[in-house]
Each structure stands twice: as C-alpha cells, then as structure tokens.
Image (cartoon, grey):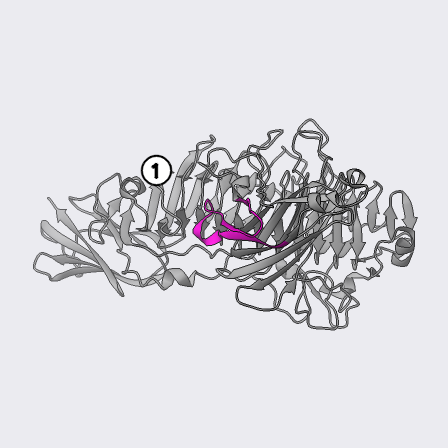
Amino acid sequence: MACIFKRTTHSCMGLPGRGHRDYHLAAEPGKSLTDRGAPARSTAGVFLLAGVLASAALAAMPGAAAAQVNGTTPGTLTAYTTVLSAGFEWFITGDDNGNCSVTLEYRKLGDVTWKPAQPLLRVEHGLWTHGEDPGNLLAGSLFFLQPGTSYEARLTLSDPDGGADQRIVGFTTRTEPRISPTRILYVVPGAGGGSGSQTDPLRGLAAADAIAQPGDLFLVQPGTYHGRLTVKHDGTVDHPIVYLGVSQSGVILDGDGGTTSVSNCVGLISRRYVTIQNMSLVNCLRPVDADSSVGITIKQCLIQPVNQPLEVQGIRAAISRDLFISDNTVLMTGQWATIGRTGAYGTGGYGILIEGTGHVVCHNTIVEAWDGISIPVTGTAVPACITSNVDIYENYIDRASDDGIQADATHHNVRIFRNRLLNSGSGVSFQPAFGGPGYVLYNEMYNNRIEPYKFHQETYYGWTQETSGFVVFHNTTFCNRNAWYESGIWRHGKFRNNLMLGGRTNTPSLLMDYIEVGADFDGDALNRVAAYPTLVRYISVSYADMPAFNRGTGHEPHGLELTPAALINAPTPHNPEWNYTDGYGAAYTPADIDLRLAPGSAALDRGVPLANINDGFLGSAPDLGCYEFGVALPLYGPRPPDPTTSALELPAAPLALDAEPNPFATATTIRFELPQRDAIALRVYDVRGALVRTLADQEFAAGPHALAWDGRSAGGAPAAPGVYFVRLSRPGAEATRRIAMVR
C-alpha cells in the first residue's frame, strides 16, 4: 500500500515558503525524501524500513470496529536538526487512549551498532480549549551530537491496541556559521563614498550595505557609527554577508538614544543570512531587530540598550528561523536588588527575545533583564509562528527579575541545557507548553527567589492555558524559599536525577497541592530545612520522607534526602522569607558558590541511567544534579575569540586617523582609533620627509584617542606655514594624514 500523509498547519508569517511545518517530510513507505526547503546544513531524509499500518492490521482482527479508536495509524514523520541536537515529530491518527509509544535509537552514518535514546513523548491530544491544539503526535529529541555530522535514527512505533511501524531517518547536524569571504571590504565612519579598499575604505555602514552581495566580508574599523543601519541585501546559507568589527569595544553602533520600536542599531527585518559580529550596539530601545528573518547570526557583540521598562529588548527576532546568537554580552537595565518584581512590570526588559524554529542561543552573558532569554509567542491567542526545535545552552544569566529563561507558549523540542541561571525570580518557565516536550537538562540555578520551575497554567491572555509536556533531568537548583513550591497545574512532566534544595523553614521542601496529571518523579534529591517533619506535601497529603512519598504515590523509588553539605559550597540564599513586596536584595556571584558535588557526597552514583543523556558516567551510576563528579564544568557565557575568524589571515586593518581643524592656524587635534591595545608612534613630518615632532611613542588602549599638535617643532620653535604629514604607525599597519598650517 502506498500512502502519503500530509497535514496543514500554521506557518511563520513573513518567511516565504517556510513555516514551522514546512520542515515536515511526507514519506511514502519504502521511499525517501529530502526536506528541500531546509538550509543546506540541516537536511533530513526519511524512509520506511519496515511498517505495518494499523488500518490493515485492525481489519484482520475480530472486533476491529471497537478497537479502531484506540489503535494507531502512523502518519507524517518530521525530522530537523540544530548544531548539537535533532528532533522528531511523528503524527498519527487514532490512539484516543494515549498509550501509543515510539522508541528512538541512533547511530553515525556508516556505523553498525544502534545506540538507545530517550523515547518520544506522547503529546497530549484533545486537552486544548483555546485553539492551539498541537495535533495528534509523538515528539522527542536526540542530544549531544557532533556538529556537521551525518546520522541515522530508527524510530519504532507500537500500540497495544493495534498499529506498528518502524522508520529510519537520515539527517545531518548543522555547523556553527563560519566566515568564508569571497570579497573583503573596509568600512570607516562617514557619510558615503569610498571603494572599500584599504586605502579608500567605504565611509559609513550604509555605503557598505549599498554594494553588499553574498559572500562579502566588511571589516568595520574603530569609530562611532551613528543612527540605524537598515540592512537591505541578503546573503545565502553558504555565503552570508558579514559585518565584522575589528574591535568589539572600538566599533560602536550608537542608536542615539531612541526609545521607539524602530529605534535600533541594526535593522534586519526580513533579511536572510547576514552576520553582525564583534562590535558594540548601544543606546537605543532595541539594538537588534531581526523580525521575520532567516539565518541571521549575532555573535561576539556587546549589547546595551537604553533604560525603559519591558519594551526594551537587546536582541529581538519574532517570527524568525535558523538564528545563531552566541558569545554576546547583553547588559540590560533592571534593578534586581532594590526593585526586583515590585516596580513597573518588566523592569529591565528582555535580553534576547526570539520565536520560530531552528534557533541556537548559546554562550551569551545576560545581566539585569526581566527575562534573560525569552522565546514566547508575541501575545496572540493562536501564535502566528510555532516555536519548536530551539537549543539554548551554556549561557550565563544573572539577575533576571522574572525568568532566567522563558519558553512560554512553545511547542515541541525546545531544549534548555547546561545553563547557569544565577539570581532569578524563576529559573525556567514553560507557561504554557503546548504539548512539548520541553527539555530542561543539566542547568545550574541558584538564588531563585520564587521557584526553579514555572510550569503551571497562565491566565494572562484571557483564558486558562493548559500546559503539558516536560522532561526535567539532572538540574541543580537552590531556591531561597521551598525547593519547589508549585502554585498551579501542569500535566505530563518527567523528572529524573535533579537536586532540588530550598532555604525556607517551617514548610515542606517540595510543595504541590494540585493534581499534576502524568507526573513522574524518580531519582531526585530534596533537603529538609530545620528538621521540619514534612519533606513533601503532594496533592494535600503530607509525607515525612522520601520512602513515605514513594509508598503513598509510587513516585521517587530512588529518591534521596540530603543536605547542602552534599555540595562543595552551597550557602542557603539569604532572606528565605522574601515576599513580593520586597526588592530581591543582594545578588550572588559565581565566586560565592560551588555547586559541584563534594567528595563523599551522598549524591554520588545515585542517579538513574538515561540513554543519550548521561551516557559515559564515571562511577557505578550517574551522579545527581548538573555536574558529574570529576568532569570539567561547562564554559558559561562567551568563549575565547573565534579561531575561525583569526584563521582567515586577513590583511592588517587600516588605522583610523584624522586631524581637526585642517587647515589650521596655530594648533590642530590629531584623532585616531586602535582596534586593540597596541604600541604606536604618532609623528609629524614636513614635505621633505624630515621629522618635525614626535607626538607619541608608547602603548595605548583600544579605542579612540586625541593628541594636540601646537604647530611647534621638537625644540619648541614655531613651525613654518605649509604642508605637513601626520603618520600613525604600529607593527603591521600605518596611516598618514596630510595637514596644512596657514598663518
């Protein structure tokens, strides 16, 4: 039987021919397809290895009509990738009782042995009342893959009520964007003109954009570039247009204090494959606006917007696809200590706010935001753009007054892993998750003032948003209140190997008084504060310890009770009786804590093995929490300079040099900018080449400098009127400016 399954769903507005569901592959049994709409580095092929369609199987069974509703008919299988992960969505019909399952295995292309992974999550179907039903499917992910590598995944579907199928999906992970220029051009501040050569650089970023074509690398020289760069040309996936600052601190894009929604340093709306790298974007409401964009890279930049509540956004990209945002420092404008959540809603704004599919957000530092990283819908009842297949990892987020990472109103395969969330209202928010899975893996969260996880339903948009589908493994959290006080309802969450600590006295460590349908806890650890007799209160029943909790509920057969002494240095966060009328108080720094397991800790070798998650653990079993004993910590925040950039062996960048006034009567000011700290010589010569005066011969810091020449020689005598040359030199580069003295 040759069947082809298709499905009509939302698409991302503003992206021609490319919505989230355009990632799907409609595969005929026995044939293969390639997702031709996907970028070249994230293709995925699908073919059916062996399958038994439920409809055929049920037709041969006695009582087939009665079993038809609960039996499963497999449909379209979707595969997609990021740099380190792959995700799958397998749509089905039937399975009204929700007991269909899909196992997942994987291997590198060419290998023989299949490796097990976590099974796909049965996405809850039929729960949703507000028009955002995710559909009838199972979804899940592979983790910790190698970039730019081809794999196969084997997915096996089964349903005890009838229906079975097995398919093999071929896919290739993406690579981090690289700079491979076909043309190198130079840019200095100015208002137009120039050819782009070293000796005749383009004057101003608008002049660069006017001639930009795929593969161009614009080397942006030190200086301040005022106003908004509105990019009007596109690159391609293999040949992006790159604007590369030669010095992050020295290349400044200044938004001139704008406070409207179009106040940006860089406007990338509807652009494709453009890179902004290694510069400072400052002094406006939204330094980067990349709505409706594809393949944009923002890397190694300093982002510092103006001080406005909520509307301020460091990097914004609504309804977008395949963004790569990495190694940036985003300095927002919150007031953690004194205001926290007590001031105007949204104090500090959003550090990074994006939505859509295929995004990677990694190695950024974000400080003093309302939400550090936010990937929600933009407020519509039914999202214009489905947010799935997003990786957020190895970021350092400090003093986020609301959420460290907000993944509200997202759908499938949103992966939040290996982040450090220090000082936050809530650590991670899925409020709601439209079916999931939303993954929260290996994150360090300390000094959460409200809760580590915000999973319960939200009524902000005018309805009760159901929220379902979480996978929470190997996190270490220390909240100043309860280890976790869940104040609402969520559904279908799986928790394994987490360390959850709290500091509040006279209350249970884990407090959940609502019925959380589909909750599944095992291998987690809690602490007891000040000998309080109840460790867990769950659905209005108190349990003295983990064994009692297991006997009463079936949860936590491998659960553990421990103290903060299980960690190397985990002081109880201050003011555990904090309430919403207070500011948050003093913040902690990474030097104040060390949440690795102490030698001899009770949490060593106590975890549950999880295929593709904690493979390669060092002891007899995985350790609890986010750090395996003896393994180096992740590198949170920006990495050292990108070796792929320095490996370009670019020509030495020209030095910026000017004199004002010119001509001059008695004195002139020589201005120059350096891309990095360097030893320079600044000298004045006459038309014969004779040295008149050495103005400087020493080391200067990166950035702009100004030195005056008073029109005198080295001996102090007035120089004669005429033409002179000012020469700025450093190893490998020099610049000369003609000046004229008139009397």
Residue 47 forms part of the magenta stretch: yes
Residue 132 forms part of the magenta stretch: no
Horizontal side, residue 157 vs residue 286: left or right: right
Q: Where is residue 85 in the image (x, y as percent from the top left)?
A: 57, 55
Is residue 264 shown above or below 526?
above
From which residue to which does the magenta span run?
A: 24-50
Is residue 167 shown above or below 116?
above
Q: Residue furthest top?
A: 462
Q: Position of residue 610 (x, y in %)?
A: 71, 61
Q: Position of residue 440 (x, y in %)?
A: 67, 52
Q: Position of residue 212 (x, y in %)?
A: 30, 44
Horizontal side, residue 316 vs residue 399: left or right: left
Mark 1 crowd level (few <14, some 14–19, many ≥20, 10 Å Cα): some
**What residue did someone put label 1 on?**
232
Q: In which quarter of the image is the C terminus?
A: top left
Residue 604 seen in the figure: yes
